[in-house]
Every structure is written in C-alpha cells, then in structure tokens.
Image: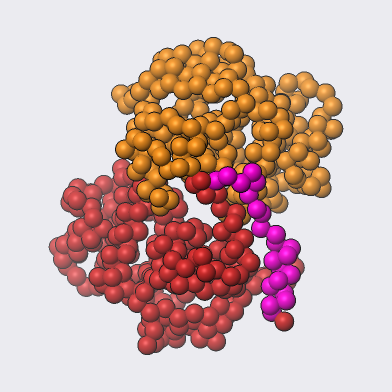
C-alpha cells in the first residue's frame, strides 16, 4: 500500500473572473521514496503540498477523487483530526527559516512544542527527544543550540532546526517546500544530505517541491514536472536527458551552463506551449 | 572604470573586507562570486556610498571616492537589486518610477525618454501606468533595470539580479542585460553565487571568501572548470557542475 495516494486533485480559488483552478487534476502515489515536484512560480506545486497537509483554507476549495494518507481518507477530514496528523504523521519543511521560526521562542522549546501537543511525555523525556532530534540533523552541541533564539543561528543551521522540528515526531511523510532555496550553495548539499539520511533510515516518504530542476533530478527517485497546475511529465532519477515534453525541454535549454558559449539563451515560448497543451488535451 | 585597492571595511570589531583589490575596465563585465557573508555585496555598498567607514582607495568612473562622502555619481553609476518585489515603490506607477530620476536631475523630454526606455527593456508601452503589483516578477525586474538606465549611466552594479526569478524568466533578463550592455557599452559589476550566470554574462570574475579575494580568473577558466584556488574548486563542486 502506498503512503499517499492522490487522484484527480483540484484546488480552486474564486476570483473576480470566476473560479480559478490552480491545481488541475493531479494524480500520483508516493511510497517510502523521494518524489520531486518541479515547476515555476504559479505552477501549483506549493498548493499541491498545502492541499495534502490540509492547509488550504476558505475561500480555497480542494477536491479529489481520492486523497489517502496511510489508508485514511483526507477529504473532508475534520480540522480536529487533521491536527492530530499534522506534525505527528506528516510534516512540512518551509523555505525560509528566518520567517518560519518564532523569533521569541528558544529553539529547544519550539522543537518541543510538537511533543507537548502530540504526546504525554514528561518534560525531561521531551528534552531528551529534542536533543536527539538536533543530533539527528548533525548539530554538534545540541545543548547549546537548544538554548539559542532563531536570530542567533545561521541560515543553514536554522533550516536544520526546522528539519529537527519536523522529524522529532518521526512522521511518515515529509513535505519539503523549497527547503534549500534560501540557503547558500555550500550548505544546500548538507541540508539535502541530512534529509536523505532521515528518509532512508526512518523509512519516510518525502515530497520535495522545488523550482530547481537540476537539484531535484540529482536527488530524487522520481520527478513530476508541473506546468499550469498539471503534471506534464514524469521522469526517473537522473533522467533529465530523457525529458520529452516541450516545457521541460524549454526549461532545460533556458538554463545557462558552466561552459556557456551561446550568445543568447533560448526563451520559453509560452504561446506555442499552450497550443501544444491544448492539442494534447484534445 | 572601477578601481578598488586595498579596500578594508569594518563593522564595529568585525572586519568584513580585508584589503580587497580589483579593477574593472570600461565596457567590461566583472563578477564577484561567493557565499553570503563573503563580503561581495559590501563591495557594491562601499562603491555607492552606503558604507561610510572604509579604508583604501576607490576610483569609480574617474572619480576618487572618499569615506563618509557621497560622490555625486548618480549619472555615472546605478544599481539593480535582487528582489524586484522589494525594490519598487508599491504605490507608484511604472511611469512615476522611471520619470523620477529625470525630474530630480532636471532632464527634459521625460515623456519620450520613458517610452524609449520601455521599448529598450522590452516592456509593452501599455504597462506604463501600471503599479508593481500588476506586473510579474520578470516584468518588475525589467522596470528596475529601466529605472537604473534612465540617467544613462556608464556603470551598472548588479546585486543578484536574477536569483529571485524563475528559470525561464531568468533567461529573459540575462539576455536583456547582455543586449543592453552591448548596445550601450555599459560596464557591469555583478554579484552572484551562480557560476553559470557568470559564464553567460561576464568576462572575468573574482572569488571571494570571508572578505578576501581567493582567486581572480578569466571566464574561459571558469568555463573549463579550471578555477585553481581550493575554495574556487569547492564552489564548482558544490554547484554540482563538475
């Protein structure tokens, strides 16, 4: 049985021009693997993650033929029940630790919050789990870091703290929305390594949402390429050169290379692309 | 065009630049590469007078700069910032934004100049009276570039001009910058962490780490992945390009 099964997922927001569908009939399944969702801004990739986490509030509307997590139907799950899942069985790592950590709460206390909410552990047991989680994200002196406030740590360290916060409850599913785009190139590798390690060792399923085609291709088992709310292509690990869809090909071509000799970069022809998509839909 | 010698900048007790030297010739495109905290943005800030307390010698567009004094160089040097969402006034139309430098400097023919600039940066003229929130990220960055070019400067300082943009939009803006440079004979000083962007847009680069220049190289060296310093090689590896 797969960890997560999504069939015909749609997310709609009302607008002055009538309802706008930002996710348009997405279907995929996720096992204990690393699945990457790649797309540009507005492709609906983040909305997909949020819909799975039950984080799309009114006036947004989420519908699906099937939305199952560990065999439980998430459609119309009451908020009370969802709260028991979020942070415990499924959790989300966000882009920028600067904005996602509470600036006035010590790091250790922030990590402990999930334990406080979801378990009956004693304070000392909670503390031990917090230190363990910090160690799991390769923070060398967890005692010291637990006492710090978010502004006292670097971006890379902050992102590791966020991951610690997500894994402290050992969830089955981790959704990482652009977990490395606010980080320097040098710490990106480290953060990805840590997530990789956690996924392998704890047998988590990971949904990695990113705009960085190359990074996702190097790092995930499978890739879904999204454009305008739809999956246009599914690719295997490291198989970017097997891409066929004009959108994926256009994206790849528009990336400058290290040995860039082209005088101009090719630009995505959106009109032609929309024509292609309309043709494919028929 | 830009000559920096032995530039040292301290914030309190912390030294963020340790005697950095670099020279950019007229019409050249030069990149400063490094991670956050390496001091690459501080060099730009010192050049435009946003850092008051520095030591060393700096010459910009044939003007010797002095610490604590802002040289009147707006018509020589302009800057484009990373985030087009943060660098445009949210309640001013494109027209206001582009015409303001002209008004300040008492330049006539604003109407024609604004229209000409919209054409030059590839923005349809109908966008002239729109507000920033009615534009996409790429369009906003075009406005920011247009604003920087209104006074016809000779030097553009570019601080991560495409890192907030989508890949396909990045290509458009990079093409635009490259075209404008060729057309107007601009000198670029570009700050970035993205090595392929350097390869596309620049002639030479300097690798910065912890406030020191680790290596200066021609772009051909970068294209051949031939950076020699340990840190330069590390950057290549971490970019996953070697």
Q: In terms of image quadrants, where is residue A125?
A: bottom left
Tint applied to chain B in the drawing: orange
The reply, left or right, for residue A4 in relation to residue B181 is left
The residue drawn where x is 38% and y is 28% is: B213
The residue drawn where x is 59% and y is 63% is: A249
**Between A36 and B175, the one nearer to me in the picture:** B175
Instruction: Please state the extent of the stretch shown in magenta in the rendering.
Output: A260-281
The reply, left or right, for residue A22 in relation to residue B59 is right
Query: Which image quarter is the N terminus of chain B in?
Result: top right
Residue B15: give x, y in percent of width and height: 33, 25
Residue A82 visible to an observer of this rendering: yes
The residue drawn where x is 59% and y is 59% is: A251
Q: Is residue A276 magenta?
A: yes
The reply, left or right, for residue A162 in relation to residue B108 is left
The residue drawn where x is 68% and y is 47% is: B139
Above or below, comparing residue B36 to residue A78 in the picture: above
Q: Which chain is red?
A: A
Q: Is residue B137 magenta?
A: no
Above or below, comparing residue A63 to residue A198 in the picture: below
**Between A123 and A5, the one nearer to me in the picture:** A5
Residue A216: give x, y in percent of width and height: 44, 62
């Amino acid at each position: 049985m797969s960890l997560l099964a999504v069939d015909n997922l749609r997310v709609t927001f009302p607008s002055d021009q009538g309802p706008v569908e930002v996710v348009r009939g997405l279907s995929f399944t996720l096992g204990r693997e690393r699945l990457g969702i790649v797309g540009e801004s507005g492709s609906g990739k983040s909305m997909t993650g949020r819909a799975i986490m039950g984080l799309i509030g009114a006036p947004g509307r989420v519908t699906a033929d099937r939305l199952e997590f560990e065999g439980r139907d998430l459609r119309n799950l009451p908020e009370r029940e969802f709260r028991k899942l979020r942070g415990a069985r499924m959790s989300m790592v966000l882009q920028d630790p600067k904005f996602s950590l509470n600036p006035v709460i010590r790091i250790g206390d922030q990590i402990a919050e999930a334990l406080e909410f979801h378990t009956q552990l004693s304070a000392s047991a909670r503390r031990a789990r917090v230190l363990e989680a910090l160690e799991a994200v390769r923070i060398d002196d967890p005692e010291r870091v637990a006492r710090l406030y978010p502004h006292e740590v670097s971006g890379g360290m902050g992102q590791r703290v966020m991951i610690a916060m997500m894994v402290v409850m050992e969830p089955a599913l981790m959704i990482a929305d652009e977990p490395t785009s606010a980080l320097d190139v040098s710490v990106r590798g480290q953060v990805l390594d840590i997530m990789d390690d956690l996924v392998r060792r704890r047998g988590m399923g990971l949904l990695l949402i990113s705009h960085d085609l190359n990074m996702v291709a190097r790092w995930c088992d499978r890739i879904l390429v999204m454009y305008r709310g739809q999956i246009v292509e599914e690719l295997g690990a490291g198989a970017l050169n097997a891409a066929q869809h004009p959108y994926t090909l256009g994206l790849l071509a528009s990336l400058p290379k290290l040995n860039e000799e082209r005088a101009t970069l090719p630009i995505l022809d959106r009109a032609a692309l929309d024509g292609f998509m309309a043709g494919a839909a028929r | 065009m830009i000559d920096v010698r032995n530039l040292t900048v301290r914030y309190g007790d912390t030294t963020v630049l340790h005697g950095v030297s670099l020279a950019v010739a007229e019409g050249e495109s030069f990149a400063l590469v490094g991670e956050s905290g390496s001091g690459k943005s501080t060099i730009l800030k010192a050049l435009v007078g946003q850092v008051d307390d520095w030591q060393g010698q700096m010459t910009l567009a044939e003007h010797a700069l002095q610490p604590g004094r802002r040289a009147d160089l707006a018509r020589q040097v302009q800057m484009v910032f990373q985030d087009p969402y943060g660098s445009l006034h949210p309640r001013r139309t494109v027209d206001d934004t582009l015409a303001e430098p002209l008004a300040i400097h008492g330049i006539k023919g604003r109407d024609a100049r604004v229209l000409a600039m919209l054409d030059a940066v590839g923005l349809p003229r109908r966008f002239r009276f729109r507000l920033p929130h009615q534009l996409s990220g790429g369009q906003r960055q075009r406005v920011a570039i247009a604003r920087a070019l209104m006074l016809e400067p000779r030097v553009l300082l570019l601080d991560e001009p495409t890192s907030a943009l989508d890949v396909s939009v990045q290509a458009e803006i990079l093409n635009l910058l490259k075209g404008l440079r060729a057309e107007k004979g601009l000198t670029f000083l570009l700050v970035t962490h993205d090595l392929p962007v350097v390869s596309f847009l620049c002639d030479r680069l300097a690798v910065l780490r912890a406030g020191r220049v680790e290596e200066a190289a021609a772009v051909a060296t970068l294209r051949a992945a031939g950076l020699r310093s340990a840190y330069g090689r590390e950057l290549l590896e971490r970019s996953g390009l070697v």
